[in-house]
Amino acid sequence: MAPFLLELELFGIRLCPWTWLAYTLAGLVHIALILNLVAVGALIFIWLERKISGRIQDRLGPTRVGGKFGWLQTLADGIKLLTKEDLMPEQADGFLFKIAPYVSFCASIGAFIAIPFAGGAYPWISQHLNAGVFFVLAVLGLEVFGVILAGYSSASKWSLFGAMREAAQVVSYEVPLGMCIVVPVLIAGSLDLVVIGDRQAGWFTNWLIFHDPFTFITFWVYFTCAIASVNRAPFDLAEAESELVAGFHTEYSGLRWSFFFMAEYGSMLSVSMLAAILFLGGWHGPIPVADLLGLQPENGFALGYLGQLLGATNVILKGTIGVCVMMWVRWTLPRLRIDQVMTTCLKYCTPIAAVMFLGATVWLFNWPGKNFFGLLDVPAAVYEISDGASGGEQIPSVVTPADRVAFEASTETKNKRENL
Amino acid sequence: MDAIYWPSFFFLLFGGLACAFAVAVLLSSNIVRMAFYLVLSLAATAGLMFLAGAEFVGAMQLMIYVGGTLVLLIFGVMLTSQERFVEMHTWAGDWVKGFLAGGALLFVLIYAAFSIPAWRGIERATVEAIPAQKSVTPIAMGLLGARTDAPDRSGYLLPFEIVSVHLLVVLVGAAYLARAKRSRESKIV
């Protein structure tokens, strides 16, 4: 993205004469956008959570701050949190206690680096990683580290219990979560999130959740494990306010406490967006509005930009719906016990995910190039898109003379090495 | 500022961070802090991998080493360690022994790294001429027995299979060891 900044000219003067400045600016723009998405997203989600929980429990929720619907309630709470005293227990490990919220928050934001907001030939993504799914999964797993550090360093038995439960939960949900993610990767044939999203271009019939019966079930297993991975009820064992006071964040107050919550809402959005990209078409809506209106990059920059904007709105909207479902689940189901969590994840989700993985493999082997439970063909355009986006890694089918030369050269150096 | 070769700058940054946190592991006496510094050091190493364009290896490093340290910290250290191991104190003799062993290993590694001619004296122009390979497809093809870079397509299917079966055996063994034991004594009683 940065090279085009170098060529920008205004009245004959190059706007950015230094390469390093171009790269720094491009990086800062990405960081600012991601930070805003997580921070403002948390602001809205917390308000939404209060409203949804209120309605589910036959209450009104916040109504006063900011006029109608109490939509400024979170902002008011944020100001309150800013003015609170930053407490720390006397026995606490000060360094780890202070740094733990940032670890969680950084991991939560870091996942967005590799999550695309729109695809096509010019994807809207901070870092277009070839192993994007894997990176997101790895970084999201780090959020737990902050929770465990917080629990340990608080010097409180409630916090330590919360951290221990969290650790037990991690080892149980990560296996089925990874297995569920493998299924869309298998069907799209790539670890690249942009390729996986563009594999589902067109109508909702192309979504991977409707690819076959196995992916349909895989999606729900993924969503269950995703709820467990962001510590939301019914899997909020680490918090468990009815038994552990407030679990791992019992001793936290003020802004540090709120960092944990920004991290939680940020990772709720990122796992929901990941679900949207892997199973629910990503930036390709139920109805391909952008395609029907001709909002493609081929038809000019402005139209292409508009199409991408529509795609980004689409994927964020799908992520938000996922977050709302998580809230609905939280305020509907009671909390599981720790042994029930492990039973759910290890004894039910893991075998189901394994069988679904096998089933999807067999299905893909029997009906390749079919969508929507094997009823429709995969549109031909999909293959062109995925070839173009993956950088067109061509695997030569025959050995060319150049290959032979390269091979001989490499064996020569190998022989030299052995002689030495 | 364009005179600075930025890849070198970031290499030194990440390498320096990795080394600094590794030293911090040695210097701290609290075992949880040690694990924290170890995680940071391993994460900086992952940064080096990403810098080299090896995204898959970098993500793998984050997943296995950083995530693995977490599990190690919880189950290996916090649950099993006795009081005297939580705060570890090293004696002067330990330092001497550690420096001897570590220094010898470092010497061997540096000697090995610099004695291979193919690894030495690569010009910047040569490095920049190598096309950036960012796809993970060749890795997968190689593991399935068809390397894309070797003309005879010799891959690593057999090692891959051996490692997979080995891991499966380990998993089954772990599940067997960790299963809920029905004690025979209670049956007799």
Image (cartoon, rainbow, N blue to C red):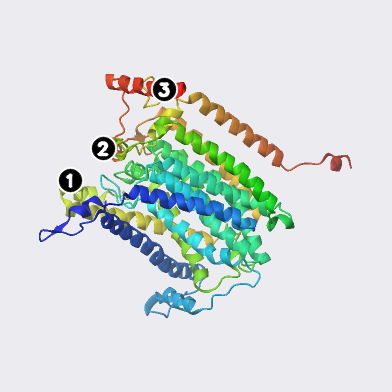
Badge 3: how crowded within 10 Å, few (<14), some, or many (20+)? few
Disc 2 marks which residue? A381
Task: Identify the residue at image location x=50%, y=74%.
Answer: A59
Mark 2–mark 3 Cα distance, whole angstroms, equals: 49 Å
Q: Give above or below for B98 relative to B139.
A: below
Any mark on residue A416, and which? 3
Residue at x 18%, y 59% (from the top left corner): A15
Q: Nearer the viewer, mark 3 or mark 1?
A: 3
Q: CA distance from mark 3 to mark 1?
A: 52 Å
Q: Earlier in the sequence, mark 3 or mark 1?
A: 1
Quadrant for residue A237, please give it.
bottom right
Local SS, label 3 = helix
Is A295 in front, or is B48? B48
Dot 1 corresponds to which residue?
A298
Which x, y percent locates residue A63? 43, 78
At label 1, the amino acid type is: Glu
Residue A367, x across and y down, in percent: 39, 30
Is residue A223 visible in the rendered image? The answer is no
Pick the residue in front: B16 or B38.
B16
Q: Earlier in the sequence, mark 2 or mark 3?
A: 2
